[in-house]
Image (cartoon, rainbow, N blue to C red):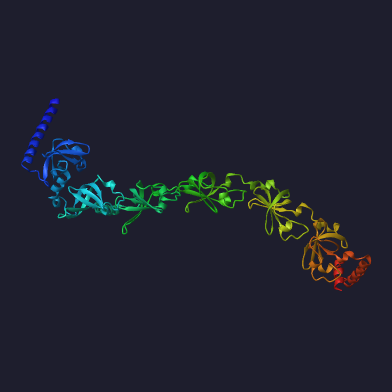
């Protein structure tokens, strides 16, 4: 083995010696001319350069970048080099392997690479406006012809080998223009034609995410781009396509629609998986308890994602049995996980109704038990309307007192005449409707209706004390004992003629009056302030008048003292 190696070494040395002798002879004959291609022997291969002996006074140094692969070179082998200078300022020859190759190649360039042909070449360097590519000779690749989209960074191409289309050759100027873009476009056109011929809706194809927009992503199907719209990316809710795909990523997509005339293809990503709504009734039957996450809040409720692609709506009315929720954000926040109950499914519309309050017992189911009809209750005035007041009996449970059930004796036109917000009120349960979530309460039912036995409270002719509660154009209302109201007509205020009641009487003024009429139908007493001061003689005179009027009215209804006084006033 050692002998064999030594033999090869001796052989190589003898060969080098023979070549060297030829080169020296060549030099002595004056054959080394600048601008000529001359042979040279490789004497040393370094990391950055190669040393060559061309038979000159000194060896030449060639940059390693001029060689495609230093590993293919061997010490002792002969290569052709282009002699640029016999001696530089240091007395060393200047040679170029690359220029020798190009000079040789230029002689047959049209034969090897005519215009329109395909040439393989290595990118040597970046220059202004493009790249220098060696296809045997240096050629120019404009930046606009590097790719379909002109790249921003040309450095990435240096040292790479590609196929190029020869666009133009100018032998006089030794200029060749190449294009990689046209080659790519021709290849894509051919691929697009083949793809459009074979592609069918329903097929699943492999593609690369080329570009992402707000409305979707363009997928390179290796021949043409297809649009993957955001609505076809996921069965679930997504706000931007970047949540589903990344640029440069390989994806499996389904062909949804093909327009061969316009060369457009619509793609789907979610269609490659099963639609979760297909067997929704079996997965989430009505009444089932489900777990999900709040994904959106709207004024009327909250959307809950119970699996990707399946959302249910909890309407604001289904959030609590008792809490008065005006907006969902009072109870929930986006991202919150919770349980809910399935209330209904509309498969065709892909809608599920959910409820939160159904997780707890309905307190209204116990209302009839907790607040039986006839029970006495106590609560705080929470709110008032024109027709009544809402009394809070417990959190979320209100009873309503209608204005007609606030007083036996006073005609209440508005609840503010009797109550104000925050008042503590006693009442009697009149009716319970759990299905409508209503409790009817009565305040007046706490006490006995005095009008059922009014004669035990007042008789005609009684002198009474009271307080003015309201002034009207026709008289004044007086509050008497036991909250019974009386009305003093304008004619019964004074012996003198009165134009306006408010000129004589004021609210909260204490007055003394005489009962002159008891009106059971209107549940009101007729009072006379002026009659309160009549003497016995005056009353006797009035009584005589009454008797006379009574005799005249024989057969008619009996007239009471009030009628008599009214008649007297008219006289």
Residue at 24% across, 47% down: 125
Question: Which percent across, then down, holds residue 564?
Answer: 87, 69
Question: Which percent across, then down, holds residue 311?
Answer: 49, 49
Residue at 32% across, 50% down: 220
Residue at 12% across, 26% down: 3
Question: Which percent across, then down, holds residue 494?
Answer: 85, 68
In the rendered structure, the answer to whether residue 145 lies left or right of residue 412 reads left
Question: Which percent across, then down, holds residue 10?
Answer: 11, 30
Looking at the image, can residue 87 be seen? Answer: yes
In the rendered structure, the answer to whether residue 165 lies left or right of residue 17 reads right
Q: Against 412, is 556 above or below?
A: below
Q: Nearer the viewer, residue 373 or 151?
A: 151
Outermost residue to the front: 89
Q: Nearer the viewer, residue 20 or 519?
A: 20
Outermost residue to the top: 2
Q: How many marks?
A: 0
Outermost residue to the right: 537
Q: Against 299, is 2 above or below?
A: above
Image quadrant for the C terminus?
A: bottom right
Q: Quadrant of residue 45?
A: top left
């Amino acid at each position: 083995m050692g002998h064999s190696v030594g033999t090869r070494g001796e052989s190589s040395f003898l060969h080098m010696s023979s070549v060297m002798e030829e080169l020296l002879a060549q030099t002595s004959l004056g054959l080394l001319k600048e601008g000529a291609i001359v042979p040279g022997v490789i004497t040393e291969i370094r990391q950055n350069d190669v040393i060559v002996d061309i038979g000159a006074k000194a060896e030449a140094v060639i940059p390693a970048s001029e060689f495609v692969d230093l590993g293919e070179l061997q010490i002792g082998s002969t290569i052709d080099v282009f002699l640029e200078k016999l001696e530089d300022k240091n007395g060393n020859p200047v040679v170029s392997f690359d220029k020798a190759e190009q000079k040789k190649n230029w002689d047959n360039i049209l034969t090897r690479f005519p215009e329109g042909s395909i040439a393989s070449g290595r990118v040597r360097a970046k220059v202004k406006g493009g790249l220098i590519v060696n296809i045997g000779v240096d050629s120019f690749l404009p930046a606009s012809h590097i790719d379909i989209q002109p790249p921003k960074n040309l450095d990435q191409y240096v040292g790479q080998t590609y196929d190029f289309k020869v666009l133009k050759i100018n032998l006089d100027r030794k200029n060749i223009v190449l294009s990689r873009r046209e080659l790519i476009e021709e290849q894509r056109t051919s691929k697009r034609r083949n793809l459009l011929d074979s592609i069918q809706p329903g097929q699943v194809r492999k593609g690369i995410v080329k570009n992402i927009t707000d409305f979707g992503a363009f997928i390179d199907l290796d021949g043409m781009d297809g649009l993957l719209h955001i609505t076809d990316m996921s069965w679930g809710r997504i706000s931007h396509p970047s949540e589903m795909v990344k640029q440069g990523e390989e994806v499996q997509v389904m062909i949804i629609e093909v327009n061969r005339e316009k060369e457009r293809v619509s793609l789907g990503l979610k269609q490659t998986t099963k639609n979760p709504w297909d067997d929704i009734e079996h997965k989430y039957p009505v009444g089932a308890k489900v777990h999900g996450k709040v994904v959106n809040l709207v004024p009327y409720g909250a959307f809950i994602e119970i699996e990707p692609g399946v959302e249910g709506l909890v309407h604001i009315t289904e959030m609590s049995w008792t809490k008065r929720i005006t907006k969902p954000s009072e109870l929930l926040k986006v991202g919150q996980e919770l349980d809910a109950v399935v209330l209904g499914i509309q498969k065709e519309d892909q809608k599920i109704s959910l409820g939160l309050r159904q997780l707890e017992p309905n307190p209204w189911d116990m209302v009839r038990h907790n607040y039986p009809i006839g029970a006495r209750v106590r609560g705080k005035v929470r709110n008032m309307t024109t027709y009544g007041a809402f009394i809070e009996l417990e959190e979320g449970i209100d009873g309503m007192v209608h204005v007609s059930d606030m007083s036996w004796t006073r005609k209440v036109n508005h609840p503010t005449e009797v109550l104000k917000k925050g008042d503590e009120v006693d009442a009697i349960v009149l009716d319970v409707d759990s299905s409508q979530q209503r409790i009817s309460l009565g305040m007046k039912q706490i006490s006995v209706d005095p009008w059922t036995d009014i004669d035990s409270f007042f008789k005609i002719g009684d002198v009474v004390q009271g307080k003015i509660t309201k002034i009207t154009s026709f008289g004044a209302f007086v509050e008497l004992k036991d909250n019974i109201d009386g009305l003093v007509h304008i004619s019964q205020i004074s012996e003198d003629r009165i134009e306006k009641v408010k000129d004589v009487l004021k609210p909260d003024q204490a007055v003394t009056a005489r009962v002159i009429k008891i009106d059971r139908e209107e549940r009101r007493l007729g009072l006379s302030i002026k009659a309160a001061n009549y003497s016995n003689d005056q009353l006797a005179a009035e009584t005589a008048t009454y008797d006379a009027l009574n005799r005249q009215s024989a057969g008619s209804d009996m007239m009471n003292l009030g009628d008599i006084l009214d008649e007297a006033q008219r006289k």
